[in-house]
Amino acid sequence: MAQGLLEVTGTMDLGQFWPQGESDADTIRVKVADPVQSFRFRPAPGAAFQATQAFLNASVVGGRGKQAVMKNGEVRVRLQGVDAPELHYTPPAELEKAARTQEQHNLYLQWNEKYRQPMAETATAALGQFLAGLGGPVLPCRVGTAVDSPGEVFDVYGRLVGNVFVQTPSGEQDVNLWLAENGWVLPAFYTSMSADEIQAVTEAATRAFFAGLGVWPLYSFGAGVPDFDLNLKYRKKGPQPGPAADQGPVIVPKLFRRLSTFVVNRKAKMARGSFEAFLRSKRAGDAVHWTWEFLEQGAEAAPLHFLDEFVEAGEFTVWPEEIVFREKPSTLVDNRNRPIQAF
């Protein structure tokens, strides 16, 4: 468990959330107040915070090449421990363009859309409305993440992984936990999380489940081709969500991403066989642990499993909080491509 804590102070423009903007309910852009002073780190509980300039002109090398830590003074924050229904996911092609036949290429272009899940619009709008009730259109916020080194801060897509905090009339509110407590997200655990962080999200989501809040009444264990609706596409900016119409089975978002990729590539004749076989072919990126084994033994000792092991006969056989995904490694580098190892 990390002993250090990194904090970033800034603001979020509420216009970023759908339907005014494109942000969904689990990724938030935060405008850094002062790139020199706004990143603060303390190495252990009780230690004093010190400003760090480790992230000035820094980039993350990971799953999408090289990503700048800050773009136009903003950092992208992946809300730790939670996953909202997908608002706009574009399934990648299984074959590079040069390796496709003309027919495969044409079919992929035909089906190459941004797809969404039921309740994705409603969940995003609920977050935007909650934040708008606290002020705006620009809201002060704080981002916190438990880390011991700069390389632990960002994921492979260049997003800061942490919790976002805002001030409410009753005190500071953890936005991640607000989403979980109100049922707008599902638990999504990674090996970068501590036992306390996993427990907090689990308890919040459990309360929402038993209260029938948010997406939980529509939660589905579905994990087969019939569970993906090709007609549900991203509606871009403008349309207001209609909660009565934004209905349908909500499967685990990570499975939705895998399933949409399989279905689209099968339409484009670049994938064959069953969805389960497709998942088995992706094991390199879908390593997981049972949550209880991870908490007892840690990421190094806990037995390794794979996502396909929990999909049988078109159903997901575990609850989202029962597994922990292995965080993919990324490298934080300076403007000379040298790894940044200290705050």
Image: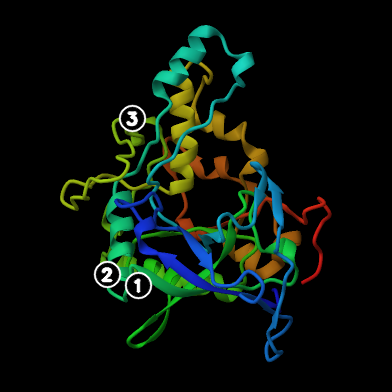
Of tags 3 and 2, the one toward the viewer is 3
x, y percent for residue 259: 45, 35
Closer to the camera in the image, 169 or 21:
21
For image coordinates 48% across by 31% down, the residue present is 261
Identify the amino acid type marked 2.
Ala
In whole angstroms, how far apart are the C-alphas of marks 3 and 2?
A: 31 Å
Toward which corner of the image does residue 53 lie, by quadrant?
A: bottom right
Q: Quadrant of residue 286?
A: top right
Q: Name the residue under label 1.
A: 207
Would you say 72 lies left or right of 86 here? right
Determine which of the numbered discs, if any, sits on residue 246 in the image: none
Badge number at residue 211: 2
**Where residue 72 sits: x, y (%)?**
55, 56
Q: What residue type is labelled 1?
A: Arg
- What residue is pinned by disc 3? 230
| Quarter occupied by residue 49 | bottom right
Please tell me which of labels 3 and 1 falls first in the chain. 1
Do labels 2 and 1 touch, CB within 8 Å?
A: yes
Q: Residue at x 29, y 31 (%)?
A: 231
Residue at the extreme left = 244
Residue 329 vertical position relative to residue 261 in the rendered view, above or below? below
Calculate the distance from the C-alpha at mark 3 to the C-alpha at mark 1. Answer: 32 Å
Q: In this view, does 82 lie to the left or right of 116?
A: right
Q: Check disc 3 and give the amino acid type.
A: Leu
First in residue order: circle 3 vs circle 2: 2
Identify the residue at image location x=74%, y=81%.
43
User: Decide: marks 3, 1 in contact (CB < 8 A)?
Assistant: no
Residue 178 visible in the displayed image: yes
